[in-house]
Image (cartoon, rainbow, N blue to C red):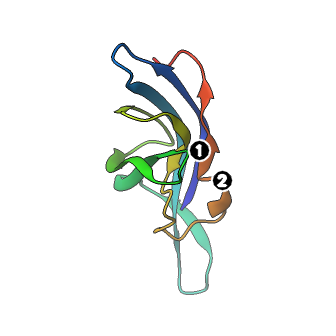
Amino acid sequence: YDNRAVSATFRELDGGDFEVTIDVTSKKFRADEQGAESETDLKDQIDSGVLGADGNYLFLEKRLVDSEKSQFVVQVSGRPVKAGIDPLNKLIDRQPDNNVVTVKTGSAS
């Protein structure tokens, strides 16, 4: 896989919850007998997650990813600090360090 969190923003909702918008990209590859990789169709359930200041998950759920660019909008009860795709690094990823980004204040929509 080549999963990457592009950006994450949040806005505070009435009642103290937060709406988080996570933009990600994802590609899936297969290797043949000689190790040559080629991109293949992507239609997988992949974890998306939002972490709070204490490092615990405010949200962690599988979402269908079936295109190179995806956006997830979720509601959490605590202030979000980091968010991304495959945050637990369950998938074999070319560069797992870019799966999670810092959540910034913005207009999540």
Look at label 1 and name its amino acid.
Ala
Left or right of 48 in this view: 95: right
Q: Is residue 83 above or below residue 42?
A: above
> What is the total number of numbered labels drawn onto the structure image?
2
Which residue lies under the disc numbered 1? 5
Q: Position of residue 52 (x, y in %)?
A: 50, 44
Q: Give the mark nearer the N terminus: 1 vs 2.
A: 1
Q: Is residue 68 above or below residue 35?
A: above
Q: Position of residue 22 (x, y in %)?
A: 50, 35
Look at label 2 and name its amino acid.
Asn
Q: Secondary structure at mark 1?
A: strand
Asked whether 35 or 68 is in front, the reply is 68
**Are the two marked residues, 1 and 2, in contact with CB atoms closer than 8 angstroms?**
yes
Q: Position of residue 79 (x, y in %)?
A: 49, 33
Q: Position of residue 75 (x, y in %)?
A: 35, 30
Asked whether 61 or 81 is in front, the reply is 81
The residue at 64%/65% (across/down) is 94
For this orientation, the residue located farthest to the bottom is 33
Quarter occupied by residue 103: top right
Task: Tell me the distance, in whole angstroms, between the alpha carbons under discs 1 and 2.
Answer: 6 Å
Q: Which mark is residue 26?
A: none
Left or right of 39 in this view: 6: right
Left or right of 12 in this view: 100: right
The residue at 59%/18% (across/down) is 106
Q: Secondary structure at mark 2?
A: helix
Image quarter where the C terminus lies is top left
The residue at 62%/62% (across/down) is 96
Which residue lies under the disc numbered 2? 98
Quarter occupied by residue 78: top left
